[in-house]
Amino acid sequence: MSGIDATPFPFLYPPLTQMAKRRKRIVHEADLLHGEPDEWGFVDDWQLIMWLMAVIAFYYQLRISLRTANMVERAMYGRLRTAMTSHVAFAKQVRALSEVPPELGIQALQDMVVTLESISSTLHLDPHALMSDSG
């Protein structure tokens, strides 16, 4: 009904749906907890990072779809999509780590570091560099 093309958004559905389900569980089940709440772990940290990227990416995609996004927002949307894909790859590396033969353990950890550095460098954007490139 809004006239916004939904085609670019499905990439964001899995993490945003996960976030909504988690929120619903917290809101509707928090008062049913007996004792201490579940401990926060690695998976929770991973999900939170994904959700933070997905919410910002959704905002940028919405602005792109409305044709109100500036050059920096369009660039950041692309970078966020790349970072989110790498973030999933990192989770797969972590999950596979327990099955890596001991002699390949150091290499597997180094590969994980490369993935994390890739995510970090992908998310870094110098808007001034974009401005000077376009002039």
Image (tube, helix red, strand yellow):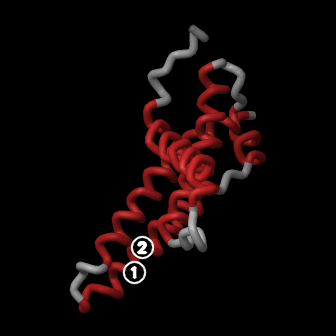
Q: Residue at x 68, y 51 (%)?
A: 125
Location of the N terminus (image quadrant): top right
Q: Which residue is nearer to you in this view: 79 or 35?
A: 35
Q: Nearer the viewer, residue 40 or 84?
A: 40
What residue sits right under mark 2 in the picture?
Answer: 112
Q: Is residue 117 above or below residue 15?
A: below
* Tag 1 near tag 2, CB within 8 Å: yes
Name the element at disc 2.
helix
Residue lying at the far bottom in this picture: please name it: 103
- Label 1 vs label 2: CA separation? 5 Å
Element at label 1? helix
Side (left or right) of 116 relative to 100: right
Question: Residue 132, located in which quarter of the rendered image?
Answer: top right
Instruction: Name the residue tied to disc 1.
Output: 109
Above/below status of 76 relative to 1: below
Rendered residue at 29%/72% (across/down): 96
Question: Is 97 or 109 nearer to us in this picture?
Answer: 97
Q: Residues within 10 Å of mark 1 (few under 14, many from 20)?
A: some
Q: Is residue 71 left or right of residue 48?
A: right
Picture quadrant of residue 45: bottom right
Query: Looking at the picture, which amino acid does disc 2 mark?
Result: Met
Q: Residues within 10 Å of mark 2 (few under 14, many from 20)?
A: some
Q: Residue at x 55, y 41 (%)?
A: 78
| Type of amino acid at the residue the image marks with label 1 | Leu
Q: Residue at x 58, y 47 (%)?
A: 28
